[in-house]
Amino acid sequence: MKNEMFVEFASVSENESFARVTVASFVAQLDPTMDELTEIKTVVSEAVTNAIIHGYNNEPGHHVSISCVLHEDEVELTIKDTGTGIGDVNEARQPLYTSKPELERSGMGFTIIENFMDVLEIISSPETGTTVHMTKQLSKKTVSK
């Protein structure tokens, strides 16, 4: 089975919960465990929040896009913005690093994503935006008789 969806929405913080619920509803057809679903919702929140706060400096009038591809037991997620981009992706991936310390950000977004997903790829450059591509292998459930 392969299924996919694409959604684009305004870069306002109120849409972070919309993104979480949308992806969770779509992924639910693979019957993930509650832990897997919680982890997927968390990474969506982190990536969308990063796009809004860091990519677009919390300015409305932009868009965040999400594509999600479902395979037999794997979820492939891509979250993209066309904002300011990341100058040094390796630095941004370091735990506790934040480009917005004045906002009291924890700097753990990419670390959380990396811990909850099997693969994390960040493609970014200044003034062109950021694409966060992630995959997660879901556990295979056995049917009890």
Image (spheres, rainbow, N blue to C red):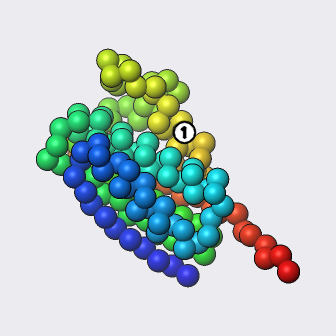
Q: Quadrant of the C terminus?
A: bottom right
Q: Kindly identify the residue that appears in the image at 49 percent across and 47 percent down.
A: 43
Q: Residue at x 47, y 36 (%)?
A: 109
Tally of numbered tags: 1
SS at badge 1: helix
Q: Position of residue 108 (x, y in %)?
A: 50, 31
The relative height of residue 4 versus residue 61 in the rendered view (above or below) is below
Q: Is residue 17 above or below residue 127?
A: below
Question: Relative to residue 26, is residue 92 depicted above or below?
Answer: above
Residue 13 position by quadrant: top left
Task: Specify whether 133 is left or right of 65.
Answer: right
Q: Is residue 36 left or right of residue 17?
A: right
Left or right: where 83 falls relative to 123: left
Quadrant in the picture for residue 60: top left
Residue 7 seen in the figure: yes
Q: Nearer the viewer, residue 15 or 68?
A: 15
How busy is the neighbourhood of tag 1: few (under 14 within 10 Å), some, or many (20 plus)?
A: some
Residue type, mark 1 in image: Ile
Q: Nearer the viewer, residue 35 or 94?
A: 35
Please name the residue shown 30% across and 50% down the image: 15
Image quadrant in which the N terminus is located: bottom right
Residue 83 rendering spot, x and y as whole percentages? 23, 43
Q: Residue furthest right?
A: 145
What residue is at 34 percent from the left and 67 percent from the top?
6
Q: Residue 3's spot in the image, x, y percent?
A: 47, 77
Is the residue 82 above or below the residue 106 in the image? below
Q: Residue furthest top?
A: 102
Q: Position of residue 21 (x, y in %)?
A: 43, 58
Question: Pointer 1: what residue?
Answer: 112
The answer to whether residue 124 of the structure is visible from this angle is no
Toward the left, the furthest residue is: 61
